Image: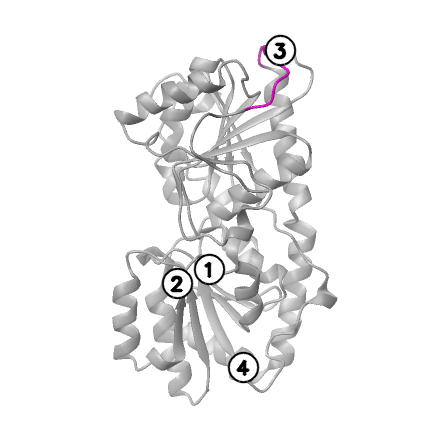
């Protein structure tokens, strides 16, 4: 019996410019730094800055999430790693749970699944005994509370592990709102209705109407991009607005903005928001989901009601008129992230779950690292 956890297989769908993907990549890099042999299998990678992939052994395996064809792909994947089995299979996208269960069953390995938001949580309905699934990890208490209680779910352990991000030295970060250029107001993430970008644009229009010269940046892409461009044109914001896709260097983008907005209508927690706070940016966020467990209003950031562009505009103007307050909130938010959401704490807690699950599950001794014969994106 193997005495320690050595090999981890992470399974995810499409990796894109969204918080759950960024969190998966942080986890993969961190596990490798902790000397755990970690392979990350995904269906594809789209619009991600290449720097985010450094230090990750990433394998693109298109098709394993497709209902019928996916079973063929999974059999191939299983054949490729059956002699070099991982100790733990960790599914990062709950939509792939059935594929993860099949793989865990064939390889006789325990399975863990991550949940990033309330929609994923409420859809996690276990209708039959699934002994392979040992632990469900949620990014916040509000996400965990949405897991449906079924007889089969009752036997599966549930944990909350808060996301972790890297917090740089504060001395190396430029202060927000610290020069004579027009302030930059920004948001980031997939351009979907639930992310509230339309309310963000309407809020920025109110800020401009109030006489403030600002620049606006939206980072990300998605099905709402065309309608958002039309809305910006109707609000006469086009000359002030820049859309950038997820291929932009995230740290550079976040450092370039002065105020970060999270206008989501629903939010598991907000990983990109944490990244912005770690870089010393003041945050204004909708008071939804796990956001309320992160931000104390007027202390670590500002809270507004969801779907309320007037309130969002008022809070943006509040920070534009009181730059000392903006910097004070930014510093408090950065310290809070350093204390509660640092990457090392997240890795410690995830690895502890791995060890507990591993210790309770029969293992087969192997010595070779996990290798996957598939189209691979090799990143050093």
| Residue in front for this viewpoint, 263 or 344 | 344
Find residue 306 and name its label: 2
Quadrant in the picture for residue 128: top left
Find residue 365 and name its label: 3
In whole angstroms, how far apart are the C-alphas of marks 3 and 2? Answer: 52 Å
- The residue sitting at the bottom extreme is 211
Count residues near mark 3 (Cα–Cα under 10 Å), then give few for <14, some for 14-19, many for 20+: few
Find residue 287 and name its label: 1
For label 3, the SS is loop
For label 1, the SS is loop
| Residue in front for this viewpoint, 367 or 154 | 367
Find residue 320 and name its label: 4
In whole angstroms, how far apart are the C-alphas of marks 2 and 1? Answer: 7 Å
Q: Position of residue 138 (x, y in %)?
A: 50, 38
Question: Is residue 156 among the parts visible in the rendering?
Answer: yes
**Which stretch is magenta?**
361-370
Decide: is 27 above or below 133.
below
Q: Earlier in the sequence, mark 3 or mark 2?
A: 2
Decide: is 330 above or below 14.
below
Q: Quadrant of the C terminus?
A: top right
């Amino acid at each position: 019996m193997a005495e320690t956890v050595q090999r981890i297989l992470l399974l995810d769908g499409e990796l894109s410019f969204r918080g759950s993907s960024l969190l998966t990549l942080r986890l993969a890099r961190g596990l490798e730094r902790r000397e755990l042999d970690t392979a990350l299998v995904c269906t594809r990678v789209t619009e991600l800055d290449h720097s985010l992939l450094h230090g990750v052994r990433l394998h693109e395996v298109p098709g394993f999430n497709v209902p019928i064809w996916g079973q063929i792909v999974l059999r191939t994947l299983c054949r490729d790693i059956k002699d070099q089995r991982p100790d733990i299979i960790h599914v990062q996208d709950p939509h792939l749970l059935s594929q993860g269960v099949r793989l865990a069953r064939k390889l006789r390995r325990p399975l863990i699944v991550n949940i990033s938001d309330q929609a994923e949580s409420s859809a996690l309905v276990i209708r039959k005994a699934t002994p392979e699934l040992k632990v469900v990890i949620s990014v916040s208490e509000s996400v965990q509370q949405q897991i449906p209680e079924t007889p089969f779910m009752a036997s599966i352990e549930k944990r909350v592990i808060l996301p972790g991000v890297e917090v740089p030295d504060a001395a190396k970060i430029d202060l927000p709102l610290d020069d004579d250029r027009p302030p930059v107001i920004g948001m980031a993430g997939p351009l979907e209705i639930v992310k509230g970008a339309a309310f963000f644009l309407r809020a920025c229009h109110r800020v401009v109407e109030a006489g403030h010269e600002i620049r606006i940046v939206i980072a990300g892409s998605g099905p709402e991009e065309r309608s958002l461009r039309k809305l910006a044109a109707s609000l006469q914001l086009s000359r002030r607005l820049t859309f950038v896709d997820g291929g932009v260097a995230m740290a550079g983008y976040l450092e370039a903005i002065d105020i970060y907005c999270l206008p989501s209508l629903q939010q598991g927690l907000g990983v990109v928001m944490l990244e912005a706070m770690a870089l010393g940016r003041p945050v204004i966020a909708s008071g939804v989901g796990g956001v309320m467990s992160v931000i104390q209003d007027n202390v670590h950031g500002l809270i507004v009601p969801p779907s309320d562009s007037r309130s969002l505009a008022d809070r943006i103007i509040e920070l534009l008129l009181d730059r000392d307050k903006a910097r004070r909130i930014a510093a408090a938010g950065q310290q809070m992230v350093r204390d509660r959401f640092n990457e090392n704490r997240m890795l410690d807690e995830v690895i502890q779950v791995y060890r507990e699950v591993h210790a309770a599950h029969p293992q087969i001794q192997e010595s070779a690292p996990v290798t996957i014969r598939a189209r691979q994106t090799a990143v050093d």
